[in-house]
Amino acid sequence: MKLVQPEGGCIDDVFHTSYRIDQHDCIYAVGDTWQSVAEQNRVGDSCGLGTLQGKSVFEQFSDAETRMIYAKLFERVRASGQAVCFRIHCDALHLVRILETRILPLSDKHLEVGFRVVSEQERDPAVVIELCGLEKPFITMCSYCGNLKNRDGEWQPLEEEISASDLFNVRDLPSISHGICADCKENFLMQLAAYRMRA
């Protein structure tokens, strides 16, 4: 993960997909395209505004590390009054998607977290399932580097684990839950410390 300034060259020129949180980190609004993106990722029912409104945004992250990272980012933006941008994976089983994420300060310590698509590439969902198995209702992916947690709980690049000859088809596909691997967590904390020193 790398903290960056907003860049050009993205598929989307503006941050259409977004959500807003209040000073207590509770979701109170989502952008116009939020629902359609949730449906593309096959989590539409669980991620609509009716389900999310009033809930802590931290309930939406699957692991403590990701919650800690975002808590630090929110704290940083509120304290500085300046937006931060970084890139993450927001993949579906059938799609590798890189997003630019922007956390924007609003009045009364509210924040807007917006996303725009940098790149998308289709893939066969069976590749992911062969690596991670179907024992769990979801597959864990690092939001920052895109590595997957395999059956043994180890983070592995997908392409190192599976070749095309291993693919198979399944009827019911599990959802992808986004977390953060140890390497990205360490890298992020170092960058955040350096970012604070420059401010």
Image (cartoon, helix red, strand yellow):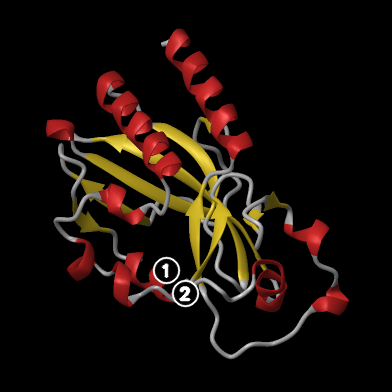
* Mark 2–mark 1 distance (CA, rounded to whole Å): 5 Å
SS class, disc 2: helix
User: Quarter-wise, where is residue 113 in the image?
Assistant: top left
Residues 34 and 8: in front is 34
Residues 123 and 178: in front is 178
Q: Position of residue 91 (x, y in %)?
A: 56, 62
Please indicate whether residue 33 sits to the left or right of residue 25 in the image. right
Q: Residues within 10 Å of mark 2 (few under 14, many from 20)?
A: few
- Residue type at mark 2 is Gln
SS class, disc 1: helix
Vertical position of residue 76 compared to residue 199: above or below? below
User: Which residue corresponds to the image point at 33% horizontal and 54% vertical from the top-left?
Assistant: 18
Q: Position of residue 195 (x, y in %)?
A: 48, 17
User: Which residue corresponds to the image point at 48% horizontal and 22% vertical from the top-left?
Assistant: 192
- Residue type at mark 1 is Val
User: Which residue corresponds to the image point at 59% horizontal and 76% vertical from the top-left?
Assistant: 134
Vertical position of residue 54 compared to residue 76: above or below? below
The residue that label 1 is drawn on is 37
Residue lying farthest front? Answer: 152
Q: Position of residue 34 (x, y in %)?
A: 34, 64
Q: Position of residue 146 (x, y in %)?
A: 63, 52
Residues 31 and 41: in front is 41
User: Which residue corresponds to the image point at 29% horizontal and 27% vertical from the top-left?
Assistant: 75
Please indicate whether residue 61 sits to the left or right of residue 100 in the image. left
* Label at residue 40: 2
Q: Are marks 2 and 1 in contact (CB under 8 Å)?
A: yes
User: Quarter-wise, where is residue 139 in the image?
Assistant: bottom right
